[in-house]
Amino acid sequence: MKNSTAGSGPKRVTTRTIAEMKRGSSKIACLTAYDYLTARLLDQAGVDLILVGDSLGMVFQGHETTLAVTLEEMIYHTKAVIRGVERAMVVLDMPFMSYQASAEEGFRNAGRVMKETGAGAVKFEGGERIAELVRMTTQAGIPVVGHLGLTPQSIRQFGGYQPRGVSAGEAKRILRDAKALEEAGAFAVVLEKIPSSLAGKITKSLSIPTIGIGAGLQCDGQVLVVSDMLGIYEDFHPRFVRRYARLADTIRTAVGAYVNDVKTKKFPSQKESY
Ligand code: KIV
């Protein structure tokens, strides 16, 4: 990260800034990033939180799910992202099986990624089940973001990407999980693909911010996968993704023009040669 809160660059987003946003100063804008160049653009455009999501397993590595992503890969990508960021807070998504075996193992892995990457926080999927891990981690001074609702690391158990929290029983459980995360010390919680009414209820009952993805307008902030909202990842298009650009088309057109220029000897020109 190029500047610190004490440096000359833009004022860094911290857990305190995020808490103030919940109290009404502004909605929280979050996007994912996996590389230096994209992170730099998002930061320059004013994104508050940059999540190095394990969604990189799908949109960067081409896997069908996020399950194959390793801790080493998350560290590698987060280091690249950090180099591009001056203002935003960078959150590292703890990958599948880096914290599920025991709270102690998750705690040590969280400590390791904080030391090696310079990230500002880590994210874990789960609620009451991981409360002890969240408590240990936050008590050691590591800020934690929780993640509830459709948690992609449990996709094999869910059996698909259907919305969560639709039944009264599951909605109750998600609300209880959100409260458990807050009580354990998490500073924010991602709510993925749950009914807007439930997300609104959770947002009102928590003092920490909620960041929604497919969870409606009442959340304190929104997150999208950057390759989805830029229209680069075309494999599927869930209804909660708004496409702000169609970069896949732009890239194919540009690359097609380049290929044509090379084949027809129009590139390079005299001016582009030495
Ligand atoms: O991995 C990811 O990108 C995420 C977001 C979808 C919240 O967890």
Image: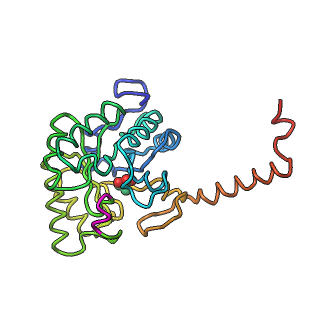
Residue at 29%, 61% (x, y): give it.
154
Q: Is residue 124 part of the magenta span, yes or no?
A: no
Residues 166 and 101: in front is 101
| Quarter holding residue 14 | top left
Return the residue found at the far top: 7
Q: Is residue 4 above or below residue 207?
A: above
Residues 259 and 165: in front is 259
Image quarter hosting the N terminus? top left
Count of numbered tags: 0
Q: Which residues are magenta?
A: 153-158
Residues 125 and 83: in front is 125
Ligand 1 is found in the corner quadrant, namely: bottom left
x and y percentages locating residue 55 in the rendered image = 41, 54
Q: Is residue 154 part of the magenta span, yes or no?
A: yes
Residue at 48%, 59% (x, y): give it.
228
Residues 15 and 147: in front is 147
Left or right placement of residue 122 versus residue 139 in this view: right
Left or right placement of residue 13 versus residue 2 in this view: left
| Quarter holding residue 111 | top left
